[in-house]
Amino acid sequence: MDKNLYFNLLKDLVAINTISSNDASLDHSNLALIEYADSIFKQNGYDTQLFTVSEGKYNLLASYNVDDSNKGILLSGHSDTVPCNSNDWSFDPFKLTLKDDCAYGLGSCDMKGFLALMLYIAIVLDKSSIKHNLSFLITADEETSMNGAIDFAKRHQNQYSLIVIGEPTELLPIIAHKGYICGQYTFIGKSCHSSNPSLGVNALNIAYTAMTYLYELQDKLKQYADDRFSVPYSTLNIGALHGGDCSNRLCDSAQLLFDIRPTGAINTNFINPLLDDITTKLKQEFGDDRVKFEKVFADIDSFLNQDSKLIENIQNITNKQCVFEAYCTEASFLQALGPVIVYGAGSIKHAHRIDERINLNDVDTYYTNLLKLIEIYA
């Protein structure tokens, strides 16, 4: 592997700000990165399609198709990164820095390191060796809404023999992960002086009741376990409660945020009616106008690959056992297009943190194994 070429590609990608955030002041378009990648794919003989996901957000599909069958491999990665505070970094997060065989920069691990490898493969691979189809997908907004993967899965159906999502997995092939539900309650009270609370309604009292119901649901979800996960049960976490401004006044509004990560033993269709029941009980107790529930993001069902032959191939190539993980990825949506593995260089421990980095020696090992997968499936 030509590490200099790879490093230069990664340097160009890291220099492009593709932060995605629910805070509009931090959110950036990914168009510049998409256009950069599109140019490289086209220069190297790949057909490209650009898809508008939302304003300023785009997916890119690049393909080299030899036949019209549903065979072939898709390498997929997201273009966006989480926000960062550059003052906290030892390096400029938008200027790739090499130190001790590691490349430091925002997104270097999650997951511009994989995008750079996709571009590298497009440049150096001898396309005469492709027997079926080789495709590359770059998506938008994985770190927030996953709208890129959702949009792509709606447009395309059953087109690939294997989909590789290059999230950082420490070179461990992941064949299953949990789903994700993120909910927000807004409670509307009525403020008054705390010396006579009967004149008002304390929104925090409604929140307390809601938390009681959610913790009851948490206990129920623990019954649905899968020992193949390191945390074998479906988790529910109340992550934030905001409300009130002083001690001597009843709180007039409050917000409660929580998430649920279901195992494959249950799915969102099972959980959502239980959440509806909680909302109904709260409205019956406190009034329809005092309780509002909404989803922060689209629901993500769990992901599971049960293709035994593919799993055998992956384990033989990587010399690693396939594993189950608690976090979730775009695999939940892209599995509609074919069997998926989540497999990549870098560690999730180095993602979403100050001084994000990826080890170039791990990338070299990963590249070798990707070529073996491309030889089999493309």
Image (cartoon, helix red, strand yellow):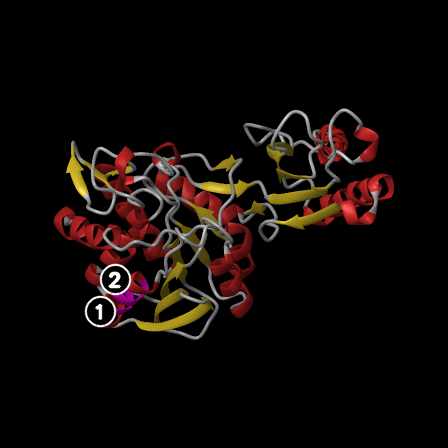
In the image, residue 144 sits, relative to residue 60, either above or below, namely above
**Mark 2 vs 1: CB contact within 8 A:** yes
In this picture, is 342 found above or below 235? below
Which secondary structure class fits the magenta region best?
A: helix
On the image, numbered disc 2 is attached to which residue? 122
Q: Position of residue 81 (x, y in %)?
A: 37, 48
**Secondary structure beneath label 1:** loop
Left or right, 276 with respect to 123, comes to right
Q: Residue at x 68, y 45 (%)?
A: 267
| Label 2 or label 1, whichever comes before in sequence order | 1
Q: Nearer the viewer, residue 204 or 12?
A: 204
Left or right: where 254 falls relative to 282: left
Q: Is residue 132 visible?
A: no
Left or right of 195, for residue 240: left
Residue name at image x 27 percent, y 40 percent: 86
The residue to which callout 1 is attached is 44
- In the picture, the quarter occupied by the C terminus is bottom left
Identify which residue, 65 or 265, lies in the foreground.
Answer: 265
The residue at 47%/41% (across/down) is 174
Q: Which residues are magenta?
A: 34-39
Q: Which of the pair 309/106 is nearer the observer?
A: 106
